[in-house]
Image (cartoon, rainbow, N blue to C red):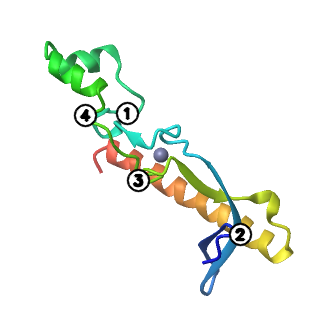
Amino acid sequence: MKPSRNTITVPVYTNRDQIDATFPARWIVCPACDGRATTTRHIECDGGGFTASEWAEACGDDEDFAEDYFSGRYDRECPTCKGRSTIQVIDEEAVTGWRERILLKAYYEQERDSREIDAIQAAERRMGA
Ligand SMILES: [Zn+2]
């Protein structure tokens, strides 16, 4: 791989087959961990940190837990950036070719569809399906 030009390759599905589309890429600070490269999400219920009652439930009178928590003992490598603190995203502004633009549009539509499917599945799980 040439280091001079960052690219990102993603599968784009057409009606008949799959195309590996390569787009220019840029690095951004990982939005999942804010560039900290670690996460404590696995012990937090909703990934948004503790509420007061969750905190009380999690550690109660256990001061060791609080100490461990704040000292980073529960830190894990961020799964989104894999501890790199930055992630590669498609650099839309550098996508100039008409063919790439069409592929990018198809890719975004595909991503949106899969997010909708995820949301439906998550809703079903909540309903106990
Ligand atoms: Zn991250």
Residue to which mark 3 is pinned? 121
Q: Amino acid at mark 4?
A: Arg
x and y percentages locating residue 112 in the rendered image:
61, 56
In the displayed structure, 44 sits above or below 93; it is above
Q: Amino acid at mark 2?
A: Arg
Q: Nearer the viewer, residue 124 or 11?
A: 11
Q: Of label 3 and label 1, which has the lower sequence position?
A: 1
* Mark 3 secondary-structure assignment: helix
Residue to which mark 4 is pinned? 73
Residue 46's tag is 1
Q: Of label 2 and label 4, which has the lower sequence position?
A: 2
Residue at 32% across, 33% down: 45
Residue at 39% across, 41% down: 38
In the displayed structure, 56 sits above or below 92; it is above
Mark 3–mark 4 distance (CA, rounded to whole Å): 33 Å
Q: Amino acid at mark 1?
A: Asp
Circles 2, 4 touching at the beta carbon (< 8 Å): no
Q: Which of the two discs, 3 and 1, sits closer to the camera?
A: 1
Q: Amino acid at mark 3?
A: Gln
Mark 4–mark 1 distance (CA, rounded to whole Å): 19 Å
Q: Of label 3 and label 4, which has the lower sequence position?
A: 4
Mark 2–mark 4 distance (CA, rounded to whole Å): 37 Å
Which quadrant is the N terminus positioned in? Answer: bottom right
Q: Of label 4 and label 1, which has the lower sequence position?
A: 1
* Mark 4 secondary-structure assignment: loop
Q: Is residue 14 left or right of residue 53?
A: right
In the displayed structure, 66 sits above or below 117; it is above
Q: Residue furthest bottom?
A: 16
